[in-house]
Image (spheres, helix red, strand yellow):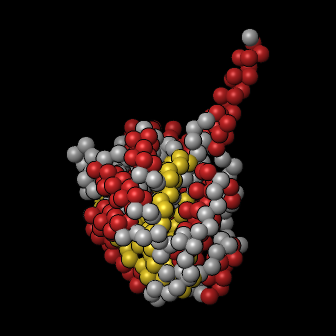
Amino acid sequence: MLYLTIIGGAFIVWLIFVLLFAPHIPYHIEADVDARSRHFVQVLESTLQTTVTHGNRVEVLTDGDQFYPAMLADIRSARESINLECYIFKDGGIARQFIEALSDRARHGVRVTIVLDAIGSFGTFRRVSRPLQDAGCRVEPYQRITWYRLGRLNNRTHRELLVVDGRVGFVGGAGVADWWVAGQRGKPAWRDMMARVEGPLVSDIMGIVAENWLECCGEILTAPDTFKPREARGGVSGFALKSSPADRSTASRVLFQTLVEGANESVAICTPYFLPDKAFREAFIRTAQRGVAIRVVVPGPHTDQRWVRLASRRMFGPLLRAGVRIFEYEPGMTHVKSLVVDRLWSAIGTTNIDNRSFEHNDEVNVVFRDAGVAARVLADVERDVACSREVTLDAWQQRPLWEKLIGGVAWILERQQ
């Protein structure tokens, strides 16, 4: 009996360690880089094992009243294939619109494949998947919760992706849920952003969707209606970047830190969860001390994760002293995940500035080297800053004692989130 108790205790300790922590790399750059240089492009392509493609058309869509109608319109126009991947797919009014549109296309012979994260869509997976499967859609859960997968329980697909007919791709922070259009519990709808992409980049986005489909059911997607020839549709240069803990040194972390430290003039970040580890905080401080104007927009009191906000605010002091400006968005919850550097580079996707995104989750970002796209994203940043309260060093130092005490014990979220 004692033997079994010891084994059981050891298992619980191991499980807690696996769930809460991951091996940590203190990232830093070898030498200064210039985000506007050709060398910088080469560094990103080589280090991230990606290629900047040219000839893309990009439309930045703000909030659910823009991106949901655009996504549904493309789904309803599909003729060959639809590939959808969501961390969140919650039953409700908007979900029913997606289910109806996807089911209709499947009944008309369109091949529909859907990956839903088993935890992100927990509680509604069966309700949303049954009518889809009845209509002929193929639906798979990502990382189903089973005893033999406990070691990967913390690895979720946080990717929010849609590819239609291999020609149109959507990437951004929003899943499928009513709170992106109507809010919840009397609160405003969430702020968010999606990018609609046409052109050569769509093939790369489709490859990322195919990766998770393969892991779910072992099928390698190869049909010609899924992967289309790379044809130019516009004048934007960019690349799609997948990131996964299987890569060990996660690509999203390399991307974000290299972009921040390569900045010469400005950095604008919007993120719902701002928990940079010590190495990344030092990168922010070094960049700000070089005279780069850094602005960070985070949720204010309407955050959906109050403990995370407290843990985040705990580390504001050194950043504020270095000149980083932090704005707390006040109208409601902001879930936007974007980064703009030097009014040239912009990244839109699912990656938060925290270790859950950098070390635990499968993530995706589309990254553009285009002043026009950067200006469009910055227009949203400026609007959000205008609706935010700036956190000053004096105000931060005078925050309530209870917040200081709780923030002091919330440090564990710096590694978990």
- Counting from the top left corner in percent of width and height, residue 243 is at 60, 61
Q: Is residue 29 above or below residue 99?
A: below
Residue at screen point 77% across, 16% down: 3
Residue at screen point 61% across, 36% down: 146
Q: Is residue 76 something one can see in this rendering? A: yes
> Quick one: 338 or 104, which is closer to the camera?
104
Residue at screen point 67% across, 36% down: 148
Q: Is residue 142 above or below residue 234?
A: above
Q: Is residue 401 above or below residue 29?
A: above
Residue 294 horizontal side relative to residue 209, left or right: left
> Quick one: 293 or 257, which is closer to the camera?
257
Image quarter in which the N terminus is found? top right
Residue 155 horizontal side relative to residue 126, left or right: right
Q: Residue furthest front?
A: 108
| Image quadrant assignment for residue 362 | bottom right
- Counting from the top left corner in percent of width and height, residue 118 is at 51, 44
Residue 387 horizontal side relative to residue 288, left or right: left
